[in-house]
Amino acid sequence: MRLMIAGGGGFRVPLVYRALTSSPFAGLVRELVLFDVDPLRLAAIKAVLSSMGPSGGAPSSGHPGPAVSTTTSLADGLDGTDMVFAAIRPGGTAGRIADERVPLGLGLLGQETTGAGGISYALRSIPGMLELAREMKRRCPEAWLVNFTNPAGMVTQALVPVLGSRVIGICDSAGALVHRAARAAGAPLPEGKLDGVGYYGLNHLGWLYRLESGGQDLLPGLLADAQALSGFEEGRLFPQPFLQSLGCLPNEYLYYYYDTQRAVGAIRTMRQTRGESIHEQQSGLYPALAAAGSRAYELWDAARRSREEGYLAEAREAGEQRDEDDLAGGGYERVALGVMRALSGGTGGRAAELILNTPNAGAVPGLPADAVVEVPCVVTSDGAVPVPQDRPADAQLALMQRVKEVERLTVSAAVRGRRDDAVRAFALHPLIDSGELAVELLDGYEAAFPALRRLWRTGS
């Protein structure tokens, strides 16, 4: 199989390569093509991959990795490709700083995928991803697109009209929640299996509501056990009495909805936003990686660990550290490769069960059939089929419906060039909820990203 990664100079690409040299994914890919518009970033990541192995400090699996090539030509990258992974970031880490700072300046949450920052990020991501999808239709129409580009749900929603069922959105946060909760409940799940799991939501907005083992739902007992909840990230994010009254475990990003004031206050007291921290780290890192020779992997892995340590820092108490398992890596790339292996028939005819972003098709009652949702799916060589879930509780469904309408308006703004829809999306988002602030937000983002003004059609 030939795999192309769009955004091949991305920081997490070595995680994909590392997984491709390990069971159960070794041998799936014969050729890995890294496509990026930035030659320096490509050179740096190629240096990291070249240094992986016993002499470069990376774990050795005993399996040779796929042949690796790089290109700045999208056409060359796509020709002959069977599978595309996409993880692009228009505007780079500097763009992320603006995504966060513009709303923070108005007293709102500044986060890259949730709230105002997520809408801004989507307005930049969707046009480039549509270009990629259209080129795929021309050059490799039978290829699958596995989308990691954020905000993953909104971007996938925009791509479905072009690629249909051949685009699947992924994120590791929902699956990680399920596996952490299962371990805490004493019934760890095998990889690629979600028997007895009930989960519904949108990307970065979902809830684990059932966790069965041996015919018994273990979730109520877990929610009543403060000590067990304290053993994993999502259990620590929310007070135990709140979780027990809620009757389910929220995705970690719901912290921004359930404890908004605390989140905004914590971010505003930090020396740097998350985006500023990552931008500072990466500005010097990429040139250093390109020149590091055999030490490139070691240098990259130290930076990766530092980056993981800072994830969701605003939600933790001073001095509280992330779990060692969460710092080890191995999240979204294993989801992506699990999807790829099932789509390619590499599971020996067995279906894989993964939480993915795909059109609803009735899986979540109360949401439109064409709404991209994040739910357990059965994946085979024919694609991903969502598994029917229970109807969400009224409050959860209302939040999902409102945020899905925000996503629909954002996609309309990006695809059709409708500035009014962008303003309406900002105004409707529950973390903004103000027409006046919506206008200020879009004005601020247009000042930060002048190219955004060129997206709008006259009279929109």
Image (cartoon, rainbow, N blue to C red):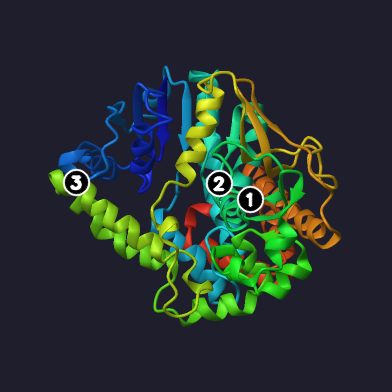
Which is nearer the eye, 95 or 228?
228
Question: Residue at horizontal 27%, vertical 30%?
Answer: 62
Whole-percent x, y for residue 293 in the image: 13, 44
x, y (%) of residue 394? 86, 59
Q: Residues within 10 Å of mark 2 (few under 14, many from 20)?
A: many
Q: Which residue is mark 3?
A: 290
User: Looking at the image, is 209 positioned above or below residue 41?
Assistant: below
Point out the frontmost of discs 3 and 2: 2
User: Who comes first in sequence, dot 1 or dot 3?
Assistant: 1
Amino acid at pointer 3? Ala
Left or right: 344 in relation to 39: right
According to the picture, the residue beneath numbered tag 2 turns out to be: 171
Q: Quadrant of the N terminus?
A: top left
Which numbered disc flags the more N-terminal residue, 3 or 2?
2
Real-space Cα distance between discs 3 and 2?
29 Å
Report helix, strand or loop for mark 1.
loop
Tag 2 and tag 1, C-beta contact below 8 Å: yes
Viewer-closest of 23 and 218? 218
Give amino acid for label 1. Asn
Residue 203: mark in rendering:
1
Q: Nearer the viewer, mark 1 or mark 3?
A: 1
Tell me where residue 199 appears, x and y as whole percent: 71, 49
Say what amino acid the circle numbered 2 marks: Cys
Percent across and percent down for residue 204 are 62, 55
Q: CA distance from mark 2 to mark 1?
A: 7 Å
Local SS, label 2: loop
